[in-house]
Image (tube, rainbow, N blue to C red):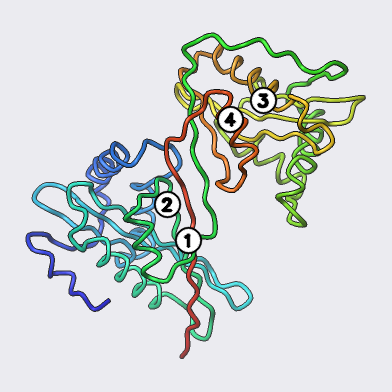
Amino acid sequence: MSMDLTDVSGLVWRAIRPEDESALKVLDSACKAVDGDEPVSELPGDALKAAAEHMDNALGVTAPNEIVAVAWVHANPPQEGLQQVMLGGRVHPEFRRRGIGEALIAWAESRALNLAKPDITLQLMIANEALTEDANALYLDYGYENIFTEFMLVRPLNEPLPEIPLPEGLTERRWDTVSAPLFFQAYAEGFKDRLGDVVPVKEEWIAGYAEEDEDFRPDLSRVVLEDNNPAAFVTCEVSGQTGWIAQIAVVQERRRKGLARAILVQALKRLQEEGCVEAALHVNANNTRAAATFFDAGFTRRLTRARFLKEIATGR
């Protein structure tokens, strides 16, 4: 796209500065109020981090007294002939469909090419945590491929939940240093049909919860055992008044016997007793079996998150 950034009347295009943090938070809130409130994205942090790396890595679009759009790029170090560059951006709902999004993605691609090392395959990656129809169309028009789509599902916790006991012969344990490997085993076997050969390292998976996830609640998480062998698991997180079902799975041999619904409802009860007013989770768009279990348990769809990829071969 050859559009001059000054072509959009009445707006000023400039570099993002540290003092823009408050205005970026206002923009983030305005977008989330319309597109869906999600806790995953960090618009102010991502834009300011990119600007700190280089003043030309974050571009703001300003109207009088406010930032109405922003875009940023972050280049990862090259690895084995590939270099990944993350592109991000948002446009205030009242300023959409004016060509600003098109101008920002064109700017971001141009900046990414300037950052890329020569003679390398450049991977442009876009992560959108609240995908709109217009954003989806824009990415596809620019040649990006959708490589991942998840739905955010939510359920209120203001009503009593049914009593659903575990099937006979099963016991459960909460997360601790001894049971954590059992959780991993349940994860690896429960997601075997989706992970394929790409299974995380056990110690790294456990540390991701125990050491890196500040919202993780080991006291609310459970692994279900049958004769000391993992049959299912659920891990939970709490952020504010929202309780998250971080991961939940049943090993293949125990499926279609009501176990998934039982451990889900019991986890919701624990979140409810913790004082959470809402439960939330993410489910892959093509995991229709799991989605059906969640819908049957009272979850509804709030928004869609997705990842888009475009590869460009650079030259000298």
Q: Residue at 42%, 71% (x, y): give it.
A: 143
In the picture of the structure, the residue carrying the numbered disc 4 is 294
Query: In the visual, does 135 lie left or right of 306?
Result: left
The amino acid at mark 1 is Phe
Q: Nearer the viewer, residue 284 or 219?
A: 284
The amino acid at mark 3 is Pro
Residue 244 lies in what quarter of the image?
A: top right
Question: Residue 34 placed where, x, y %?
Answer: 28, 39
In the picture of the structure, the residue carrying the numbered disc 3 is 218
Residue 202 lies in what quarter of the image?
A: top right
**Category of crowding for the residue at label 4, using alpha-carbon neighbours closer than 10 angstroms: few (below 14), some (14–19), many (at least 20):** many
Tags 3 and 1 in contact by the CB under 8 Å rule? no
Q: Residue at 16%, 55% (x, y): give it.
A: 62
Secondary structure at numbered mark 1: strand
Secondary structure at numbered mark 3: helix
Q: Nearer the viewer, residue 301 or 176?
A: 301
Counting residues from the start of the chain, the first of labels 2 and 4 encountered is 2
Tags 3 and 4 in contact by the CB under 8 Å rule? no
Which of the labelled discs sits on residue 128, or is there none? 2
Q: Residue at 13%, 69% (x, y): give it.
A: 6
Secondary structure at numbered mark 4: helix
Whether residue 238 is situated above or below residue 72 in the rendered picture = above
Marks 3 and 4, how far apart at CA: 22 Å
Q: Nearer the viewer, mark 1 or mark 4?
A: 4
- In the picture as drawn, the residue positioned furthest to the right comes out as 227
The amino acid at mark 2 is Asn
> Quadrant of the image for the N terminus?
bottom left
Counting residues from the start of the chain, the first of labels 3 and 1 encountered is 3
Tags 1 and 2 in contact by the CB under 8 Å rule? yes
Question: Residue 41 placed where, x, y %?
Answer: 42, 45
Counting residues from the start of the chain, the first of labels 3 and 4 encountered is 3
**Category of crowding for the residue at label 3, using alpha-carbon neighbours closer than 10 angstroms: few (below 14), some (14–19), many (at least 20):** some
